[in-house]
Image: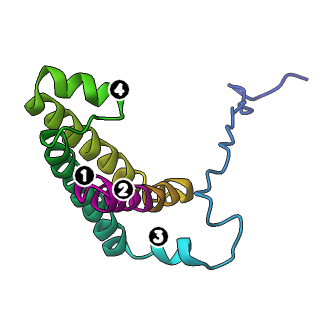
């Protein structure tokens, strides 16, 4: 007896299973400060704007301190200030804006949100140091 099928009905399919990508919040399931922070984009935006303002304040106080005879501790910025204060200012502000933009674009990741808070604390500490010890001459 001959088979009456004209074509083979069985087809082979290739199935791909993509790994699940989690953002760091789903695994833990524990609400906290970072989870609240993630759910409030205005708070993230306010933090990043504050980071940029602290960066600008750091730049202005650095220029003031250098005018009074202080020296820049960061060797890269020292070289830039020696060549051109305008170039150093542009580089500092553009790098800061680039970092803030990357943080904003990747704000759904837990570690990036933590980095934004560390940047806020870091720039706050630098500005407090400059106000307390460099500008006032203490």
Q: Nearer the viewer, mark 2 or mark 4?
A: 4
Looking at the picture, tell me which residue is in the foreground, 83 or 27. Answer: 83
Circles 2 and 1: CB atoms closer than 8 Å = yes
Q: Secondary structure at mark 4?
A: helix
Q: Residue 47 vs residue 122: left or right?
A: left
Q: Which residues are magenta?
A: 120-138
Q: CA distance from mark 2 to mark 3?
A: 21 Å
At mark 2, the secondary structure is helix
Frontmost of labels 2 and 3 is: 2
**The magenta stretch spans residue 122:** yes
Query: What's the CA distance linking mark 2 and mark 1?
Result: 8 Å
User: Alpha carbon of mark 2 to alpha carbon of mark 4: how far?
Assistant: 18 Å
Specify the label residue 123 is tagged with: 2
Q: Position of residue 130 (x, y in %)?
A: 30, 55
**Residue underneath mark 3:** 38
Q: Which mark is residue 75?
A: 4
63 or 88, which lies in front? 63
Is 63 on the left-hand or right-hand side of 108? left
Q: Which mark is residue 76?
A: none
Nearest the eye: 53 or 70 = 70
Quarter the N terminus occupies: top right
Q: Which mark is residue 58?
A: 1
Residue at 60% of width from left, 78% of height from top?
Answer: 32
Residue 131 x, y percent position in the rendering: 28, 61
Which comes before the other along the chain, label 3 or label 4? 3
Which quarter of the figure has residue 62? top left
Residue 48, position as x, y percentages in the image: 31, 61
- The residue located at (15%, 37%) in the rendering is 89
Give the alpha-carbon distance from disc 4 to disc 1, as whole Å.
16 Å
Task: Report, in whole angstroms, how far the alpha carbon at label 3 lies from the one at label 4.
Answer: 36 Å
């Amino acid at each position: 007896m001959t088979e009456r099928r004209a074509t083979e009905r069985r087809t082979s399919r290739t199935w791909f299973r993509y790994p699940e990508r989690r953002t760091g919040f789903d695994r833990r399931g524990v609400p906290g400060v970072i989870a609240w922070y993630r759910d409030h984009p205005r708070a993230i935006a306010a933090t990043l704007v504050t980071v940029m303002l602290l960066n600008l304040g750091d730049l202005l106080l650095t220029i003031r301190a250098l005018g009074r005879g202080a020296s820049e501790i960061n060797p890269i910025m020292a070289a830039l200030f020696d060549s051109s204060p305008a170039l150093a200012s542009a580089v500092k502000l553009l790098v800061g804006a680039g970092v803030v933009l990357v943080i904003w674009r990747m704000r759904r990741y837990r570690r990036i949100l933590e980095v934004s808070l560390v940047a806020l604390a870091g720039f706050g500490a630098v500005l407090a140091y400059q106000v307390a010890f460099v500008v006032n001459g203490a």
